[in-house]
Amino acid sequence: MAHGWMIRTFIKHSDEVEDYPELNEMARTIFDVFRAVETQVEDPQSYFRTVRKKLGKLSSAAEQFEKDAWHASTHTNFQQAAIAAKFLGEQLLELVTEAEKLVPRPAPPKITLPISPRPTPGPAAAE
């Protein structure tokens, strides 16, 4: 997560954001992921489930950032930030996959069906 925060900080403090505000989408997405998981730190199952849910959005933002960063600047810092943003998603996917092997999944809820009374045999059944 610290890796992601460094990417976000770089984007937020780069001068190019003034001319290319679309770069902020990557920073917003990282912030969104962090806000979503920060309340889940005490519950590993929820934490990793939330991270998995956010991976698609993070990957999409990284792909778009890679395209937008080239328009904003060809500086090595932007190239590295684009690579790092994609790598962040890959790292999180690996971590979530490993965590799911170690953290037991919650048991599905028990479903109790109501028991309907059996029909009592009528007088014709006794014969």
Image (cartoon, rainbow, N blue to C red):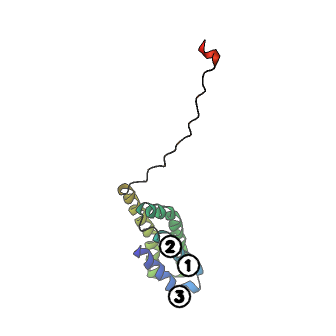
Label 1–label 2 contact, CB within 8 A: no
35 is higher (above) or lower (below) than 102: below
Choose the circle earlier in sequence order: 2 or 3. Answer: 3
The secondary element bearing badge 3 is classed as: helix
Which comes sooner in the sequence, label 1 or label 2?
Answer: 1
Structural distance between the alpha carbons of marks 1 and 3 = 12 Å
Q: Position of residue 42 (x, y in %)?
A: 41, 67
Q: Nearer the viewer, mark 1 or mark 2?
A: 2
Say which residue appears at 53% left-offset and 88% top-offset: 15
Residue with the mark numbered 3 = 15
Residue position for label 1:
24
Q: Which residue is mark 2?
A: 35
The reply to whether residue 74 is in sight is no
* Rendered residue at 41%/63% (across/down): 44
Image quarter of residue 126: top right
Measure the alpha-carbon separation of dots 1 and 2: 16 Å
Q: Which mark is residue 110?
A: none
Residue 83: image quadrant is bottom left
Q: Quadrant of the C terminus?
A: top right
Sort mark 3 into few (<14), some (14-19) or many (20+) by Cα contacts within 10 Å. few
Gap in Å between the C-alphas at discs 2 and 3? 25 Å
Question: Identity of the amino acid at label 1?
Answer: Asn
Q: Does the image show residue 38? A: yes
Type of amino acid at the residue the image marks with label 3: Asp
Residue that extends furthest to the bottom in the rendered view of this protein: 15
